[in-house]
Image: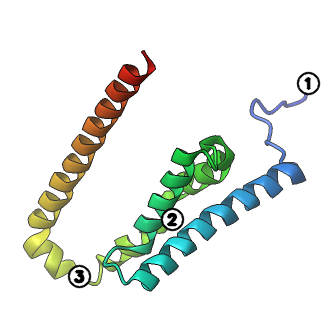
Amino acid sequence: MEAYEDPKPMKRFSFKHVGRLLTELVVLLAIYQLGTQLVAWLAWPIPGGVMGLGLLLATFATGLVKPAALQLGAGVLMAEMLLFFIPALMSLLDYGGLVRNDGWRILLVIGVSTLAVMLVTAFTVEIVCRWKVRHEA
């Protein structure tokens, strides 16, 4: 009888890997907290997370931080994103009547806003790519 060999052995994490992951998560959390504090201090009517993303983009654009430096932590957050939405999904149970009566309107707003974000992103990428090609030549 042959010994069973697992085709996908469990990935082992080293202390270095876990340390890097925790460091990246702390940096991302610190940027978020800084954005939240900045919005509160300036009394701007935008979410702190949006300001944090703007700060993160600024650090990437200026070269202070390379995107690869936060890739592991961001990847973990993206992989577990569903956990962040479970409380919002559970709240739908409390507002069943609203969803039954106005659910189509809510879905329409979600669909149109998603399409708008995708279009703006696509056009922005296209403009930046064309600008980059013009200035590199």
- Inspect the image, locate mark 2, and give the three-letter code of the amino acid beneath it: Leu
Kindly identify the residue that appears in the image at 45 percent across and 20 percent down: 136
* Above or below: residue 89 compared with residue 123: below
Kindly identify the residue that appears in the image at 15 percent across and 66 percent down: 106
Q: Nearer the viewer, mark 3 or mark 1?
A: 3
As measured in the structure, the alpha-carbon distance from the residue carrying label 1 to the one carrying label 2 is 43 Å
Kindly identify the residue that appears in the image at 41 percent across and 65 percent down: 50
Helix, strand or loop for disc 3: loop
Residue that carries the numbered disc 1 in the rendered image: 1
Residue 82 appearing in the image? no
Residue that carries the numbered disc 3 in the rendered image: 95
Q: Which of marks 1 and 2 is in front?
A: 2
| Residue 93 figure quarter | bottom left
| Residue 63 figure quarter | top right
Q: Nearer the viewer, residue 36 or 10?
A: 36
As measured in the structure, the alpha-carbon distance from the residue carrying label 3 to the one carrying label 2 is 20 Å
- Inspect the image, locate mark 1, and give the three-letter code of the amino acid beneath it: Met
Res. 108 mark:
none
Residue 59 placement, left or right of 49 = right
Residue that carries the numbered disc 2 in the rendered image: 83
